[in-house]
């Protein structure tokens, strides 16, 4: 690992789950971390404290990443307190699962706003600083649902597939300026998001996974950390699937 420069990294939805693991890993790489959260101030404070206890630097920044004003305010907050964002991890995401026949428009809109519009808003908000610095890393959390589809998740899969198209397009727009744009598509990872599905679903899923078990947040974080690093300087527009062989 040729990590030598301390960068300012923003992890959206970073107070728990995969986002928290990413925040801790990037802090371990020597970066200064802004942990975005939308409502759980206590969890965000705990995530900050854990990074500080390990000798790192972190702040918590509140804001709904699907809301333009909130995004502009939180990016400014990070800039004022740490400096321009050099590494953006678009991690915040929600599910509102249902079969399409029953899916209400709000379930579609909420997922699009939180999972896809947020990626547009946050990426656009940090781009100016990255262009000025001629260096940047944008890594967004897609999903195997966005690559292969998943019944009951038409809204979620559409948003996660949208992230892949967005990633390739933005990579082409700003590649000549030293900024890489990539995505990571996790499979079935043990977090609050999947715990909500219940043990039976998790057991059934594990049987379909080549490695025979659910993934850990840290196993997704390591792929994100690599794409955010200097070592991944020649990788852009890609989606790395981290699914334990689920889709094989
Ligand atoms: P999680 O539910 O544990 O965490 C998601 C975080 O996003 C939470 O902290 C939540 O508060 C935050 N968030 C939600 N809406 C927000 C908003 N409007 N503004 C700011 N923050 C908001 O989920 P996770 O499993 O850690 O998932 C992280 C990412 O990985 C998500 O994008 C998810 O879609 C993706 N993913 C997860 C899995 C999995 O199996 N867990 C699989 C594929 C993709």
Image (cartoon, rainbow, N blue to C red):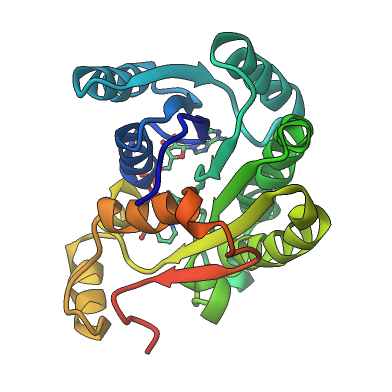
Residue 208 vertical placement versus 93 (above, below): below
Q: Residue furthest bottom?
A: 248
How many numbered discs sit on the rendered protein? 0
Q: Position of residue 184 (x, y in %)?
A: 49, 62
Q: Position of residue 126 (x, y in %)?
A: 70, 33
Q: Position of residue 248 (x, y in %)?
A: 37, 89
Snapshot quadrant of residue 242: bottom left
Residue 15 vertical placement versus 180 (above, below): above
Q: Residue at image x 50%, y 45%?
A: 91
- Left or right: where 199 falls relative to 85: left
- Asked whether residue 114 is in view, the answer is no
Q: Residue at image x 47%, y 33%?
A: 5
- Left or right: where 209 falls relative to 119: left
- Left or right: where 64 falls relative to 210: right
Snapshot quadrant of residue 125: top right
Q: Nearer the viewer, residue 208 or 197?
A: 208
Q: Residue at image x 36%, y 22%?
A: 44
Q: Residue at image x 39%, y 17%?
A: 41
Q: Residue furthest right?
A: 173
Q: Position of residue 196 (x, y in %)?
A: 30, 52
- Asked whether residue 37 is in view, the answer is yes
């Amino acid at each position: 690992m040729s990590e030598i420069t301390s960068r300012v990294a923003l992890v959206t939805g970073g107070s728990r789950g995969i986002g928290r693991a990413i925040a801790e890993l990037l802090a371990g790489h020597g970066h200064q971390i802004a942990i975005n959260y939308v409502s759980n101030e206590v969890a965000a404070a705990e995530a900050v404290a854990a990074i500080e206890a390990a000798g790192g630097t972190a702040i918590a920044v509140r804001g709904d990443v699907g809301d333009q004003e909130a995004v502009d305010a939180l990016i400014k907050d990070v800039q004022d307190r740490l400096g321009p964002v050099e590494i953006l991890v678009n991690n915040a995401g929600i599910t509102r699962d249902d079969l399409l026949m029953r899916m209400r428009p709000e379930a579609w809109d909420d997922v699009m706003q939180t999972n896809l519009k947020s990626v547009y808003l946050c990426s656009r908000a940090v781009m100016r600083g990255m262009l000025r610095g001629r260096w940047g890393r944008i890594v967004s959390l897609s999903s195997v649902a966005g690559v292969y589809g998943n019944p009951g998740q038409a809204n979620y899969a559409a948003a996660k597939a949208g992230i892949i198209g967005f990633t390739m397009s933005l990579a082409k727009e700003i590649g000549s300026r030293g900024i890489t744009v990539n995505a990571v598509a996790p499979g079935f990872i043990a977090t609050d998001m999947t715990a909500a599905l219940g043990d039976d679903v998790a057991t059934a899923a594990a049987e379909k996974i080549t490695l025979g078990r659910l993934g850990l947040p840290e196993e997704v974080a390591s792929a994100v950390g690599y794409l955010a690093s200097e070592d991944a300087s020649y990788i852009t527009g890609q989606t790395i699937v981290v699914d334990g062989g689920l889709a094989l």
